[in-house]
Amino acid sequence: MKISLLLIVAIIVASCSNTNKPVTEPYLGESLPGNEPQLFAPGFVNDGIASRDITFTPDGNEVYFGKNIGNSRYATILYCKNTKNGWTKPEVVSFARDSRYIYIEPCISPDGKKMFFVSNKGQEIDENNRFITDIWVADRIEDNWGAPYKLDTVINSSDPEFFPSVAANGNLYFTREDPTTRANTIYKSTFENGNYQKPEPMPKEINCGRARFNTTIATDESFMIIPCIGMPDSYGGTDYYISFFNETKGWSIPQNMGEKVNSATTFQYSASFSPDGNYMFFMTTKVNTLSPDILDYKTLQNMHNAPESGNSNIYWMDASFIDTLKQKATFIEN
């Protein structure tokens, strides 16, 4: 039996835009997910425009997420706040409104004092038509963010840096792209005495596959999620892998995180967690398989402006399945 897609879209929009009762519950009032991935906040975070990269303040009352158009020709960071009058509608953060530059990959530190993100602000496109991106930081000032500043040359180089991920102790993990081979390498910079130390490449268990990038570190550094291409058990595109850390054995052999988060799509390269670590958020691409009764112009517009239209979306699920993956972790014998 076919279901009218117009009706489905109307239900989604109505459920996300009820103005009679302000939504003040956590996670934009969404019902908490179980062991199956759920589309996160349709109508707010997922609305038809490509979505990726989501992060929260420690109290959960602010959510920041990325949007991009035209293969990231235009890319910026939006936010919603939970106020006494309910969650605010998405707005672009004040420092990410200059359309000449891209602003992507926000990551709020576990203590909530800093927001890391990536931008090509002040940079030119190089001779190979690449954006040279750097890691930037904005410090928390009361209920807002201060003017962003670029991290110094200990972290940022003449090559592109991407996807900062921060542990509770301040250690910074990020991706750097080689200008000649275009290969991405994952680095770690230890945070000591208020300063970042010289970044060191992560071991082969993390820098795995044919290409890898945008890794997410657990706040206690007990595991890392690695979006990776070219692994023998890949589902066909970029897959999420996970590696666990053992003080004696080091990092475990990367393990495919399974079909609930992975598929043949290439758009699987951004993961994060709720402040309490109970829920995993991840980017992927799905197309709604429900067929409309009739294809007309209005239906096509509604399909285009709804989630799961072919652009990337953000999903979430209970993170307890990671405990099961940990039990399967294997290590290279030294």
Image (tube, helix red, strand yellow):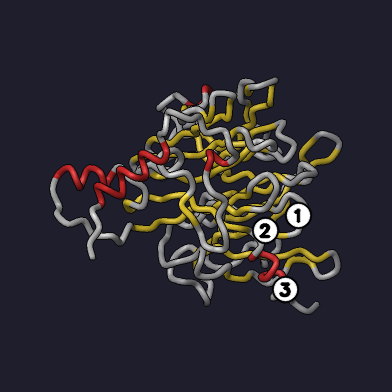
- Quarter of the image with the N terminus in it: bottom left
The type of residue carrying mark 2 is Met
Q: Residue at 54%, 53% (x, y): give it.
A: 316
Using the image as rendered, state which of residue 333 and residue 243 is in the foreground. 243
Q: Residue furthest front?
A: 20
Q: Are marks 1 and 2 in contact (CB under 8 Å)?
A: yes
User: Residue 17 falls in which quadrant of the image?
Assistant: top left
Circle 1 or circle 3, nearest the eye: 3
Is 146 on the left-hand or right-hand side of 132?
right
Report x, y in % for residue 168.
Answer: 77, 44
The type of residue carrying mark 3 is Gln
Is 101 on the left-hand or right-hand side of 307?
right
Using the image as rendered, state which of residue 324 and residue 6 is in the foreground. 6
Q: Is residue 157 visible?
A: no
**Distance between the alpha carbons at the discs numbered 1 and 2:** 7 Å
Q: Is residue 100 above or below residue 223?
A: above
Q: Which mark is residue 224?
A: 2
Q: Residue at 69%, 32% (x, y): give it.
A: 114
Residue that numbered label 1 is attached to = 221
**Distance between the alpha carbons at the discs numbered 3 and 2:** 15 Å
Report x, y in % for residue 40.
Answer: 49, 48
Q: Which mark is residue 327?
A: 3
Q: Is residue 118 above or below residue 260?
A: above
Secondary structure of residue under mark 3: helix
* Earlier residue among tags 1 and 3: 1
The type of residue carrying mark 1 is Glu
* Earlier residue among tags 3 and 2: 2
Report x, y in % for residue 280.
Answer: 60, 54
Q: Which mark is residue 97?
A: none
